[in-house]
Image (spheres, coloured by chain):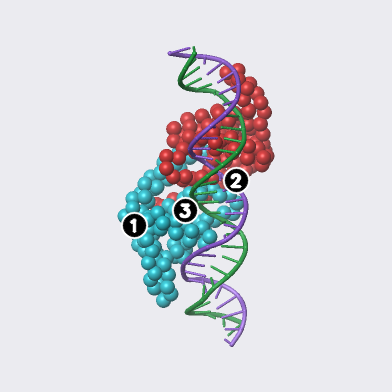
Chain colours: A cyan, B red, C green, D purple
Amino acid sequence: MAQEKSDLLQGTLDLLLLKTIAPGPLHGYGIAQRILLTSQEVLQVQQGSLYPALHRLERKSLITSKWKESENGRMAKFYSLTPTGRKQLNAELDQWRRYTNAISLVLES
Amino acid sequence: MAQEKSDLLQGTLDLLLLKTIAPGPLHGYGIAQRILLTSQEVLQVQQGSLYPALHRLERKSLITSKWKESENGRMAKFYSLTPTGRKQLNAELDQWRRYTNAISLVLES
DNA sequence: CTACATAGATAGTGAAGCTACATGTGTCGA
DNA sequence: TCGACACATGTAGCTTCACTATCTATGTAG
């Protein structure tokens, strides 16, 4: 993730990846692009973080992959959520809200 | 930090610690208590995270420690922010707000 | 007198993400 | 046509972090 300095908010990468492929299959490179775009250039997922994370999620059966042709005619590995992955996404979204809320209580007090 | 399951939001521990001693000197045990309280029992800082983190922050000269008598007559190590620590706190607070905002853009889209 | 709260600390472990690098293709401009 | 860049995937090695488990010690409440 974009790091400029601190590694603030580690542990959210999986969540971001799951969320990003929730609407439909997407390849790794595209996921990173989409996150960069929707975060308004703030969150830049590095390749060295991205691909290991995707492999990790696949090993956990939260996502599956399939080689397909991309829009521009190249081959790319498209990832999509498994039912388990979708459940995990929702659970982690709840967790994330709980935690950021709790942390805000401390930080903005 | 409270972990129930995932290690969501690692990297915020230092920030929580710095923020908690910002109003005035406090000892480790008290810091953990205060975080538990103000987060409404959500954030439970473990000792195995707490003390190493405090030592880390002290090594970085963001905080200093002094043995003093606690309210109940016991000796405890009171930590307080150095000027550098205070600057760091503000910088990290900004970072945190930037990041959570960016992540929200992705997660709540 | 025993259990618990207060108070501090460390060893060992596992996971996560980063840097840096390697590989290969297609396209666009000079 | 040649070099740079965007597209696309991947790994090795490293560091940092937080957790579990464990240890020590004291005062107090039951």
| Marks 2 and 1 close (CB-CB < 8 Å) | no
Q: Residue at x 44, y 59 (%)?
A: A55
What's the residue type where badge 1 is placed? Thr
What's the residue type where badge 2 is placed? Ala
Determine the CA span between mark 2 and mark 1: 39 Å
Label 1 resides on the chain identified as A
Report whether B102 appears left or right of D26: left
Helix, strand or loop at label 3? It is helix
Give the answer, above or below, for where A56 lies relative to B45.
below
Give the answer, above or below, for where B29 lies relative to B95.
above
Give the answer, above or below, for where B69 lies relative to B64.
above
Report whether B51 appears left or right of B3: right
Specify whether residue B2 is in view.
Answer: yes
What residue sits right under mark 1 in the picture?
A: A82
What residue sits right under mark 3 in the picture?
A: A13
**Residue A14, labelled with which disc?**
none
Location of residue B54 (image quadrant) = top right
**Residue B91, labelled with which disc?**
2
The residue lying furthest to the left in this view is A83
Give the answer, above or below, for where B35 lies relative to D28.
below
Nearest to viewer (mark 3 / mark 1): 1
Choose the circle earlier in sequence order: 3 or 1: 3
Specify whether residue B97 is in view.
Answer: no
